[in-house]
Image (cartoon, rainbow, N blue to C red):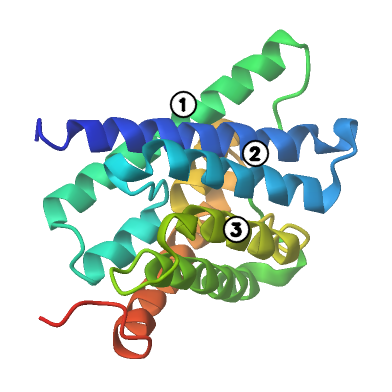
Amino acid sequence: MMKSMPKYISEIIGTFVLVLFGTGAAVCGAALNLGVLGVAFAFGLSIVAMAYTIGKISGCHINPAVSFAMWINKRMSFAEFCGYIISQVIGALLGSLALFTILKIGGFGTDALGQNAFNSFGAGGAFLIETILTFVFVLVVIATTSKKSNVGNLAGLFIGLTLVLVHILGIPLTGTSVNPARSLAPAIFVGGEAIKQVWVFILAPLVGGAIAAFVGKYLLNTEEEE
């Protein structure tokens, strides 16, 4: 447990940064004229920044869907997987708490904290969208971080840019989750419809991550021979 503590703390920090800056940009985007592209880059750049900060310690998963895929492909133990999930949820909650506090201090409303929503797609449509978006994102993570990959230290950049890519499409649709921790935290603070719908934004990314793990292993041959 103690040997893994630096990894868990790193995952808390990384997820905190992702949620604070990503959802913060989404909430403040109108005032800052960021638009979809600006918010997408806020999420992507958060990944890039953390990848080159905590990547050598924890691998910079900062996403339960990524950790789930890593566990499926036996890149981490079940105990470590559980520690990562707990750390990511804690980091996400701290990120939403920080954003909530900042908005409160500034006298802004706190009914929007970057929570995801079905919008006009319903539960089924939102599930499909999030599964596909997460599959693409996690597949890139699996491929670029494989020991067989030839991208080296550029993996963090490619992963961050892929997160930008999926947000460009996903923001107008569901707000883009692809990350159960990122969705759970703002839903808890906002409550109401957000908390009722959050199950999709938890389950769909895990399904997408699992599919990516299998495709990576059996089609792209990302894993070492057992």
Q: Residue furthest bottom?
A: 219
Q: Nearer the viewer, residue 29 or 38?
A: 38
Q: Secondary structure at mark 1?
A: helix
Q: Is 14 located above or below residue 141 in the figure?
A: above
Residue contact between numbered discs 2 and 1, judged by CB atoms under 8 Å: no
Which residue is identified by label 1?
A: 94
Q: Is residue 41 left or right of residue 3?
A: right
The answer to which of marks 1 and 3 sits earlier in the sequence is: 1
Which residue is identified by label 2?
A: 23
Neighbours of disc 1 within 10 Å: few (<14), some (14-19), many (20+): many
Residue found 53% across the figure and 47% down from its top: 183
Mark 1–mark 3 Cα distance, whole angstroms, equals 21 Å
Residue 181 picture location, percent across and down: 45, 46
Residue found 13% across the figure and 50% down from its top: 79
Considering the image in quadrants, where does the C terminus appear? bottom left
Mark 2–mark 3 Cα distance, whole angstroms, equals 14 Å
The answer to which of marks 2 and 1 sits earlier in the sequence is: 2
Which residue is identified by label 3?
A: 163
Q: Secondary structure at mark 3?
A: helix
